[in-house]
Image (cartoon, rainbow, N blue to C red):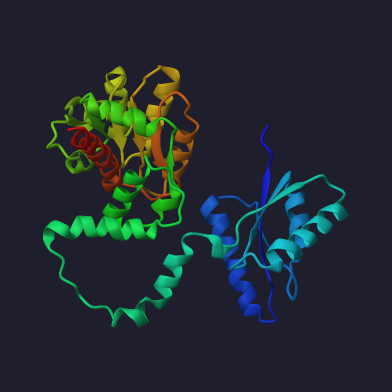
Amino acid sequence: MKKKKGFLVIAHGSRKDEANQQVVTLVRKLRDYFQSDMFETAFMELASPSIKEGIMTLIKKGMDELIVSPFFLFTGMHYSKDVPGLITEAIEETGKRIDFKMLKPVGKHPEIFNLVQEILYEEVADQLEYKHVPPSMIEQRSMEMIENFLYGDHIPEDQKPVIKRVIHTTGDFDFLRNMIFHKDAISEGLRAIRSKKIIYTDVTMVQAGINKRFGHEVRCMLDSPEVTEGAASEGLTRAAYGIKAIGHRLDGNIIAIGNAPTALVTLIDMVRRDNVRPALIVGIPVGFVNAKESKEYLTDVKEVPYITNRGQKGGSTVAAAIVNALIKMEYMEKKVAE
């Protein structure tokens, strides 16, 4: 049985109530985002609720394990000594046996660069100069800039081309930290690409975005005329019905889902119930209703390699970019071998 986690966002506290309310508002938004009431605010000093009060509130809600998110910039004394000491003391006073885990402070997060960049942008923007880059060099220069940004991040070499391609496509460095790869995803994906296996997609936008100049067959599941009629009769989305209709034809092939969470959930159920075995699932639907939940569901799959991401971001362009990265990797392998 899973332990029930409680999440405590701890800030220093201020004599200015306005500053404290900013933290309270942040935690309220976290509750709404995760649709959970197991998020509470606490302050080290100068404001309430205190750390002990925050812990007690979570205990009353049934918490078994405490996850602490310190709202501090860096790993100073408050983070490394003061806060852990206050938490330990508070837990001991409750008489409960509760383990706690300290997450990284805000300043250690890779997104801190983007945040500071955004704050500075308006002041710096008028200092930027347009520099001509020959069209043939634009992609190479873009990839060099992305590579420079990745400096210091420990990314497996086989995953790096995929992550770089997604960032290049979206302009979004969030994908640096939120992409998830099954341990066999790259090797099995490349094996399927080398063998010219069929690439199935959930929608035509993913199909349109995949590079076909190397002879790969790309089919959209919505192309079948009976899909619309069948989906309506069974009360399914067209994408979900399309997955169901293809069934074991997915075995050994690649399936790229960039739009429909319903298609991804249907596919996962078929993997588990019907022993459907694609070579690789690229499951990266976008949206607010069940998008992030369907991707979490995918990460529990052990039977089939997958590439996905955490959260609501994703989409057709991202799914196509992942497949294109694999196609480019296979092409470069051949070129090196020649």
Looking at the image, residue 263 lies above or below residue 111: above
Task: Name the foreground residue: 20 vs 115.
Answer: 115
Does residue 235 appear in the picture of this structure? no
Residue 82 at what x, y percent from top left? 76, 65
Residue 190 at what x, y percent from top left? 29, 31
Task: Name the foreground residue: 279 vs 36.
Answer: 279
Q: Is residue 33 left or right of residue 326?
A: right
Using the rendered view, name the quadrant where residue 191 is placed. Answer: top left
At 70% from the left and 81% from the top, the residue drawn is 15
At 75% from the left and 63% from the top, the residue drawn is 81
At 27% from the left and 26% from the top, the residue drawn is 192
Q: Is residue 126 left or right of residue 16?
A: left
Task: Name the foreground residue: 283 vs 325.
Answer: 325
Quadrant the C terminus occupies: top left
Task: Name the foreground residue: 203 vs 211.
Answer: 211
Looking at the image, residue 144 lies above or below residue 285: below
Residue 294 at what x, y percent from top left? 44, 38
Looking at the image, residue 212 lies above or below residue 148: above
Does residue 202 appear in the picture of this structure? yes
Q: Is residue 232 left or right of residue 25?
A: left
Using the rendered view, name the quadrant where residue 46 is placed. Answer: bottom right
Residue 205 at what x, y percent from top left? 21, 43
At 30% from the left and 61% from the top, the residue drawn is 145
Quadrant the N terminus occupies: top right
Q: How many marks?
A: 0
